[in-house]
Amino acid sequence: FMEKYHPLKELAPRDIVSRAIDDVMKKTGDEYVLLDISFKDADFLKSRFPGVYETCKKFGIDITKEPIPVVPAAHYLCGGILTDVNGITNVKNLYAIGESACTGLHGANRLASNSLLEGLVCGYNCGEFIGKNSKDSFAKDIEIPEWESGNAMDPNEAVIITQTWDEIRRLMQNYVGIVRTNKRLERAWARINLIQKEIEAYYWDFKITSDLIELRNLATVSKLTIKCARARKESRGIHYNLDYPNKAQLARDTIVKYYW
């Protein structure tokens, strides 16, 4: 079906392929589409895609003989903490590299090989910069006091965390996913604010766990993503809004600043 969406078919940019798959799944009601590479030599497929071959084999799929079920999935992050190529942020002694950073190498879409390049080059640069410029800025002997939980109680309803976690996942997938609309983003914004209030109440009432901290971070990143998506009145790269299907003439970054 890809010939209907782009001349490069399945080799089109990943945002176009993802939207095409999403469109077909919505029209047909199917849970997946099929990717067929069985016309290639079997030995070539096993050597070129050993991980894909072994994983599919575990699920009873032989990619050398039959097509692979495919669905779009969220597995990477575009954007992040604004840095330069040395991992430097506008917060003193805070450095960020990898997928937590936004260096500008990816632009409006994530390029597959750039993530490795970015991690290696920016990671190396960051280490070099810190070694040369920050030797005396970090205290060597820091005494960290014991955590004081005050009147917080032991958590007795872990289901609240798992339920909220699942709600954020579904909220972001359905309202802030591959295809967006103003209405969906408005609903996502209203819901994420309510979720954050619920999480904060739980955070102060009960003793901290790693799951609670991660849930809190998930909600924060989700809110920032929604905030940036609502601010962009166009479609560009992986951000596609049906209410603004065209690309704006002026390209600009969406940067959210908070002051503490």
Image: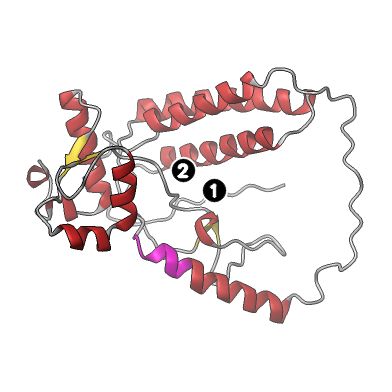
Image location of residue 115, percent across then percent down: 42, 62
Q: Which stretch is magenta? A: 112-118
Do residues under tags 1 and 2 come within 8 Å of each other at their CB atoms? yes
Establish if 145 lies above or below 132: above
Q: Residue 234, can we see it?
A: no
Question: Would you say the magenta stretch is mainly helix, strand or loop?
Answer: helix
Q: Which residue is mark 2?
A: 228
Residue at the image position 51 percent from the left and 29 percent from the top? 168
Give whichever of 184, 64 is nearer the camera.
64
What amino acid is labelled 2 in the image?
A: Cys
Residue at the image position 67 percent from the left and 32 percent from the top? 212
Q: Quadrant of residue 150?
A: top right
Establish if 134 lies above or below 69: below
Image location of residue 139, percent across then percent down: 86, 67
Q: Which residue is mark 1?
A: 256
Q: How many marks?
A: 2
Image location of residue 225, percent across then percent down: 48, 41
